[in-house]
Each structure stands twice: as structure tokens, then as C-alpha cells.
Amino acid sequence: MAAAKPDATLAAAVELARDAAIGIAEPGTVGEHVDFVMDEERVGTHYFTCTYAAYPGWRWAVTIARVPRGKVATVSETSLLPGPGSLLSPPWVPYAERLAPGDLSAGDVLPYHPDDPRLVQGFEATGEEDVDRMALWELGLGRVRVLSTEGRAAAAERWYDGGHGPTADIAVRASAPCSTCGYFLPMAGALRRTFGVCANEWSPSDGQVVSLDHGCGAHSEVDIERPEPEVIAPPIVDDFQVDVLR
């Protein structure tokens, strides 16, 4: 696309553009004139330094135009735009990508990931022999001593009544129990009927023994509410409205 040819009338309308910028800016924040750019035929934009401390490097932009064979420029639009090297807010990141391990608290729910690479279907083998079958070590063979019935009962009572049992605040607010979560690893032996280990790094219980009826917002099959995006109608521009200057 060919560049618009220079327009002397628009280029000379510096004070008109400055007055338009002053009309919308905070008092004293319109600085010196720094540039004029032709946007297209008979349309150009004047740029002024923004001296407002909160917007370093930004510029007031005033777009002006004139009608064919007209000798008077009129203001079309005034705005505040970032300039080269200006201070900008960080790019917007979706909620699901902003979360990091440790961010989850009571009442929070992580988004559902149908293709989570850390999970497989319940009927699929993991490919690790020591996980897919009951090893002799899990049965207690090879150790001099193992927990007695009394020892297991004491540990179970302590864990069940603790912060990873069903009465914890985060478990009371959870919408589903750990027993139905893909990150739940059942324990071996007698404790398997009540406890397992959480393997979800986003959960506050990651690496901890949890009861089957414990829960948190990082459940693999629970999703957050996703409201429909609001539809904003396009702006209505009156192309027949003109400014008449005496």
C-alpha cells in the first residue's frame, strides 16, 4: 500500500491538535509536539509527549482530517497511546495458565483438563511393572518388622483427624472426594481402604497422605464455571456529522 502524500493543512494544525489533547488530558500532562504522521489521504495524527508520571513513554495522539478540497482541519479522534519503550502492563494470561502449585486455597477449583498428559484412563496400564502389579515388597516381605494392627490404627486415626482428612476446611468445600480423582494413588495393604497419596502438584495436599473422603479444588474431573463471553455491539459512527467552523 502506497504511503499517503503529505498534507500541509493537516501538518500545520499543531495547535488545533494540542487544544484537543488538553481537552481530555489531566491538567499539565500534554507536553511538546513530537511527531506528525499521515495515516491516509487527508487524514493524519499529531503526537504530543505525555508528562503524566504514571505513563512514562506514552503519547497523546490526535487524529485530524479535512474534506476533499477543504482548507480547514477538524479533529476526528483523541487518545493516549504507548510510544517506543513506554511502560506497558504485562500481557494478559488466562486464569488456567496463571495458576501455579501452591495457589489453590479453600473453595477454589482448578479448570478441567481433558487431555492432561499426567493422567491416563483408569483401565490403561502405566507401563511400569512395579506400579501395575502388587510387588512382594508391598506385601511386607523382605523387612524385619512391619506395622502392627495397633500401629496402623494409631496412624490411621491421626491422619483421618488431621488436615488431610474429611473435616479439613478445604475438604468440606470441595465438590468431589479424592477417591474419584485421577491424581489419587491408593496405598497398599490394610490402609488402602481409607487412604492414598495425592500426586497433583497444584494441590495443597501434593505428596501427602489423604483420606478417600478428603478433597480440594484440584480434583481432576471437576471444572470451574465458564460464563459465556459478553457480546459488545460495534460502535455507531455518524459519518454525516461535520464540524462547521466560522
Image: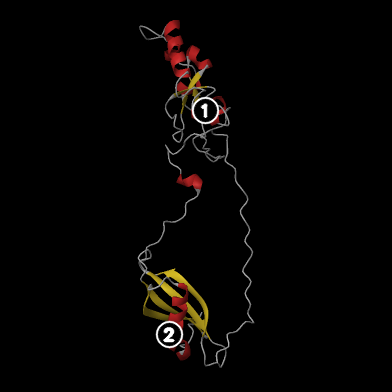
User: Foreground: 165 or 25?
Assistant: 25
| Res. 40 in view | no
Residue at image location 46% in from the left, 84% down from the top: 16
Q: Position of residue 116 (x, y in %)?
A: 52, 38
User: Which quadrant of the view contains residue 201?
Assistant: top left
Q: Element under label 1?
A: helix
Looking at the picture, which amino acid does disc 2 mark? Glu
**Is 12 situated above or below 193?**
below
In the rendered image, residue 18, in percent from the top left (x then y), is placed at 43, 80
Residue 203 visible somewhere in the drawing: yes
Whether residue 23 sits left or right of residue 234 in the image: it is left
Pinpoint residue 83: horizontal percent, then vertical percent. 39, 70
The circle drawn on residue 232 is none
Residue at x 51% of width, y 87% of height? 73
Considering only order in the chain, which callout, 2 or 1, is on the residue closer to the N terminus? 2
Q: Residues within 10 Å of mark 2 (few under 14, many from 20)?
A: few
Q: Which residue matches tag 2?
A: 15
* Residue under the image location 42 percent in, 85 percent down: 15
Towards the viewer: 123 or 43: 43
Q: Which residue is mark 1?
A: 171
